Image: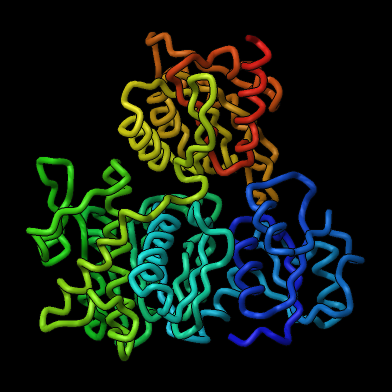
Amino acid sequence: MEMREESCYLVGIKGTGMANLALLLMRMGASVRGCDVQETFLTDLSLHRGGIVVDTGFDPAHLSGSATMVIHSSAYHRDLPILQAAKAKHIPLYSYPEFLALLSTKQDSYAVAGTHGKTTTTSVAAHILKEASEGDFPFYALYGSSALNQEDALYQGSECALFEACEYQDHFLSYHLRGVLVTCIEYDHPDYFSDLDAVKASFRRLVDKLEKGGMLIVCSDDREARELLSYARRTRSDLTLLEYGFTAPGPFRILENPDSTFSLSLLPEYSFALSVHAKALVLDHIGAVVLALSVLLDRPKPRLYLQDKGLLSDEVLPSVTSLLMSQLASFPGCRARTEVLAEEGGVVYVDDYAHHPSEILTSLEELRSAYPHSKQLVLFCPHTASRTKAFLSSFASALAQADALIIQSTYASARQDSCAVEDTSALLLEAVQEAIGTSGKPVAYAKDDQACVELAGLWLQERWLCITMGAGNNRPLGPHIAAFRRSLS
């Protein structure tokens, strides 16, 4: 998409997706500026490094006469004064998903969808496409985080694009997609979907909308994803259908080897190690390989984008698959996905975005495998009161797996829901206390950040993990906790 003549103003620019979009637009040649709250977020540094000016607040005066389009986070409604000002000035106005929908029409577009694992799978797929082609594959990627070694948007050209596609409010139904990978389907976003059946119906509509002759890839280990594949077999005979997983039939069945490595049924003699341990994360990495393979082989001349050692042979599938799999070991991980921030005083500080019970279980499993002799203190910031109430029992059961827990106030995001005025942290605390029973695990509620810092600082000991967790903004607490512990020495 040609953006060299565009001056883009992004409202809510500090959100992970919005910040990555801002950097991508810069790489595409646009002039970019934006605004957001004063609070410091994970994305502040990348925006600063990218040379993007961020205005504080949402004053309509921020909107200069040079803006040719305004893109706003879906967390903000059109009645926001600055958005009203854009409308009054007849400046083209898009929500984040609306602009992604526009981008998706400009080239062959592929996406990762699913309740969990979208960001990791998209990031890994983008990484291995980039590395396997030595930077020559003309694609770009846009998703809700960034790889740990990535300081700028991943933009190598615009022959095709890779997106993270979220089901919330049916956003992904507006995208024009040639192919999609579905990681799993589970009930989430209770402020929009009434039940699991409503979520499943949304994914079926996604399959209905795929480009003719396109592709659907699913994880066979997930029951609802398998059901979606069956639906596609009945209704979309034009699609290429692929499945992967520990139970998948065909070439992409994952085999566990005695030495803790893995193989695929396509290449049983080729073993590979992964930097992740939790089953869900292994699935995300292999799904990324299948997606990258499918995208690459969907191009008219895939040979042009491969390293010499990966030139296409008579055995196309194993040749390209082995090349892509060889890049997995160099994937550095994603920001805020079991990300190790620091180690000080015998404590490892970790940040993780998990905000759904299933994600919490996966993250704690991964960290327990990586640090088998360490105890886990979780500082959990609930995100959206409606989600907390809908999954209260499951949240309690998942969080009870930690060795110690501090519950913070429900994050007051710009996205409102029917329970927004109610802080559900007290309900969650009570449910967790019931779940842990008489085990003696310490559990407490912290009314504010300072209380959380002091309590965590007092509880932590050597060989503990301190995990800031949730979709809120508690990541900055780690350095403050470390400083508080130093003050106790």
Image quadrant for the C terminus? top right
In this view, which residue lies farthest toward the left?
A: 269
Where residue 303 appears, as percent x and y from the top left, is 28, 85
Residue pictured at 70% horizontal, 39% vertical: 421
Where residue 359 appears, as percent x and y from the top left, is 41, 42
Where residue 217 appears, as percent x and y from the top left, is 28, 69
In the figure, residue 244 lies in which quadrant? Answer: bottom left
Where residue 337 appears, as percent x and y from the top left, is 46, 45
In the figure, residue 444 lies in which quadrant? Answer: top right
Q: Colour scheme used in the picture?
A: rainbow
Residue pictured at 31% horizontal, 57% vertical: 328
Disc tally is 0
61 or 374: nearer the viewer: 374
349 or 200: nearer the viewer: 349
Up the image or down, 193 lies above or below 323; here it is above
Q: Can residue 247 be seen in this view?
A: no
Q: Is residue 291 visible?
A: yes
* In the displayed structure image, the side of residue 54 where residue 194 appears, left or right: left
Residue pictured at 25% horizontal, 86% vertical: 238
* In the displayed structure image, the side of residue 159 where residue 481 appears, left or right: right
Up the image or down, 10 lies above or below 472; here it is below
Up the image or down, 373 lies above or below 349; here it is above
In this view, which residue lies farthest toward the bottom?
A: 300
* In the displayed structure image, the side of residue 455 where residue 394 appears, left or right: left
In this view, which residue lies farthest toward the right?
A: 61
Image quadrant for the N terminus? bottom right
Residue pictured at 28% horizontal, 64% vertical: 289
In the figure, residue 127 lies in which quadrant? Answer: bottom left
